[in-house]
Image (cartoon, helix red, strand yellow):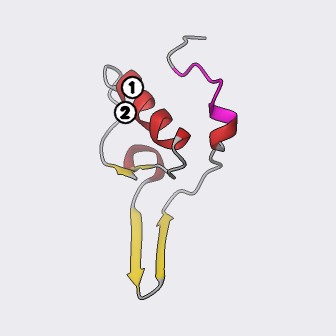
Amino acid sequence: MIVSGSQTIGDLPAIAGVKHAFRLAGAEIYHTAEDGCIRVEIAPGKFTTQSFRPHVRAAAAELAGANLLQVE
């Protein structure tokens, strides 16, 4: 899933909730505000995505118990 947008402080809880839900379903999330430019390549039998700023992504199992709306 690719989310296009900024990290406006008022939108962060909603964005985090959407990303969390899709990750729990097994989706890989790219957010242009975090990952920069996203390249998607579709070819016969092949679908790849690549970000300009790759970073470590948490696995769905690690996110299952996470409270993303908790302020630390």
- Residue situated furthest bottom in the rendering: 44
Pinpoint residue 2: horizontal percent, then vertical percent. 37, 53
Categorize mark 1 by other alpha carbons within 10 Å: few (<14), some (14-19), many (20+). Answer: some
Residue type beneath disc 1: Leu
In the rendered image, the quadrant that contains the C terminus is: top right
**Residue at the location (47% across, 85% down)?**
45
In x, y percent, where is residue 48?
A: 49, 73
Question: Considering depth in this image, is 54 or 27 the residue closer to the camera?
Answer: 27
Q: Contact, CB < 8 Å: mark 2 with mark 1?
A: yes
- Depth order, front residue of 55/57: 57
**Residue 55 appears left or right of 46:** right
With respect to residue 15, does 56 lie above or below?
below
On screen, residue 69 above or below 63: above
The residue singled out by tag 2 in the image is: 7
**Viewer-proximal residue, 27 or 16?**
27
Residue type highlighted by circle 2: Gln
Q: Position of residue 57 (x, y in %)?
A: 62, 47
Q: Which residue is mark 1?
A: 12
Tell me what residue is drawn at x 41 percent, y 86 percent: 43
Main SS, magenta region, reads loop
The residue lying furthest to the right in this view is 62
Q: Which residues are magenta?
A: 62-68
Q: Which mark is residue 71?
A: none
Does the magenta portion include 65? yes
